[in-house]
Image: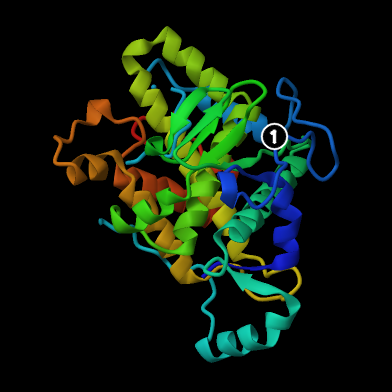
Amino acid sequence: MVRYDRETAQRGAKYVDDRRGSRRRRTGGGRRSGGRRGGGVAVGGGGALLLALLAAFCGVPALTGDGSGFGLDTQQTPFDGSVAAVDPAEQEADLGAEQATGLASCDDDVVECLEFLMFDIQDTWDRYFEEAGQLYEPTTLVIFEDVVNTGCGQASSAVGPFYCPAPGDNQVYIDLGFYDELARRFGAPGDFAQAYVIAHEIGHHIQSITGISEAVRQAQAQDPGNRNEYSVRQELQADCLAGVWGFSASQRLTRVSGVPIIEAGDIREGLAAAASVGDDRIAESVGARVEPHKFTHGTSEQRQRWFTLGFETGDPEQCDPFAVDNP
């Protein structure tokens, strides 16, 4: 169960633009300049995070899209229990005692949960960028129904969650119906599975503002025969970056209530979600032939493995699928 303080969710409300017509809870959203300190990422500048990630990419010989969608898209990667166990009796006592302080879980209100996630995930990246001597520019989550107009063109809910890297957009998009499909069709229920989706898409935002996405597009243009390979590696990197946030959340308590944000079982939900959207799993689910050369997001095993790497190390510099022969 992902838990958060409502006060923190309120801080993330500015990063959520709910466009669901009559059910729209608020106006606003849109891009904002700057993170905690204001300003934006100096894409052409230095900084350990940018240099490490770009170095990982640039070291690849000619071989690997855009790769900005989640991939509509088990074999389970063993989990070592790195998240401290929570005593059930203590957990119930905490829940009862802390309700008055505004403690909530992602089972309570999906939009409020998304507001919390948009704040917490981006606050995590803001701190990583700060340590690297850079400024982080936040993105916005757009909630829509059925179809939405974006800087990348009109998109339908059938494409699943996605990130649009077009200039003037740089936002994450989701139709909340995807979460029902994730649980029902792909067998990946749970609130951390939902959190993994958002963290993955923000991983694409990291790639966009650091110049990695553009480097991938250039490489694909120069080597179109390996376009899908580049796309797979870009998606696996976003999975790894999602795991980096998972590590950070596993080490922290809610700001006001002081209870764990996530638990060991939450990570298992994330792994199940990563497995469920592997290209091989999706092909099997629709009765299609599994053809690795057509993959654009990676296999279930790959997606789990790279998410796990990010979670176990908590180090974005380890998220370098472009630097290995067989990611």
**Residue 324 shows in this picture:** no
Q: Residue at x 54, y 44 (%)?
A: 241
Residue tagged 1: 48
On the picture, is 11 further left or further right than 66? right
Amino acid type of the residue tagged 1 in the rendering: Ala
On the picture, is 167 further left or further right than 294? right
State the scheme by which the image is colored.
Answer: rainbow
On the picture, is 246 further left or further right than 265? right
In this view of the protein, which residue sits in the foreground, 58 or 159? 159
In the rendered image, the vertical position of residue 241 relative to residue 265, given as above or below: above
Q: Residue at x 48, y 63 (%)?
A: 191
Question: From this viewpoint, which residue is outermost toward the front?
Answer: 22
In the rendered image, the vertical position of residue 186 relative to residue 327, given as above or below: below
> Secondary structure beneath disc 1?
helix
Label 1 environment density (alpha carbons within 10 Å; few <14, some 14–19, many ≥20): some
- Where residue 304 appears, as percent x and y from the top left, is 38, 50
- Where residue 174 appears, as percent x and y from the top left, is 50, 43
On the picture, is 298 further left or further right than 254? left
Asked which quadrant contains residue 137, the reply is: top right
Question: From this viewpoint, which residue is outermost toward the right?
Answer: 37
- Where residue 285 appears, as percent x and y from the top left, is 20, 46
**Residue 255 shows in this picture:** yes
Q: Residue at x 67, y 47 (%)?
A: 122
Tally of numbered tags: 1
Q: Residue at x 43, y 64 (%)?
A: 190
> Which quadrant, please, contains the C terminus?
top left
- Where residue 77 appears, as percent x and y from the top left, is 33, 57
In the rendered image, the vertical position of residue 55 relative to residue 88, given as above or below: above
